[in-house]
Amino acid sequence: MSVTIAKELNSKLSGKNPVEVLEHCLSLFNHKIALASSLGVEDQVLTDMMVKVNPEVNVFTLDTGRLFPETYDLIERTCSKYGISIKIYFPEYSE
């Protein structure tokens, strides 16, 4: 994104609440943006807001191979609650 576009967005979205910012960005960029979720409470709030704006939102997380069983349970519960599929990316273990 160019500096000019960033400045325009900052100006246009100044004073807007988080949902209004998400509505604008999700409509502007459609499926070209995604939430990188660590599944922490702040990311769960963002997931909730984003899904309410656009139920087809893209969410992904990174699985380092060291996640607790409760984390996998949370992924399943989040997907079930919101009717989404969180994409899970794994590191290249051979490297």
Image (cartoon, helix red, strand yellow):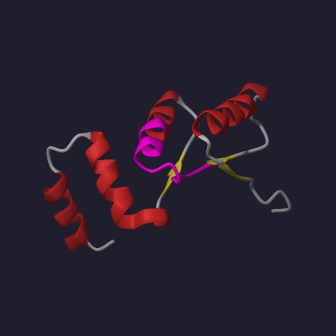
Residue at the image position 19 percent from the left and 53 percent from the top: 13
Residue 50 is a magenta residue = yes
Is 68 located above or below residue 1 in the figure?
above
Q: Which of the two residues, 41 or 17, is positioned nearer the viewer here?
A: 17
Residue at the limit of the structure toward the right, as seen here: 94
Q: Which of the two residues, 80 or 64, is positioned nearer the viewer here?
A: 80
The number of discs equals 0
Q: Quadrant of the C terminus?
A: bottom right
Query: x, y (%) of residue 21?
Result: 28, 49
Q: Which of the 4 image quadrants contains residue 68? A: top right
Q: Quadrant of the N terminus?
A: bottom left
Residue 28 is a magenta residue = no
Residue at the image position 18 percent from the left and 64 percent from the top: 7
Is 63 located above or below residue 10 in the figure?
above
45 lies left or right of 22: right
Is 73 located above or below residue 17 in the figure?
above
Residue at the image position 73 percent from the left and 25 percent from the top: 70
Query: x, y (%) of residue 47?
Result: 49, 40
Tell me where the magenta segment starts and ends, as one range: 48-60
Query: x, y (%) of residue 53?
Result: 40, 47
Query: x, y (%) of residue 78?
Result: 62, 34
Q: Which of the two residues, 32 or 66, is positioned nearer the viewer here?
A: 32
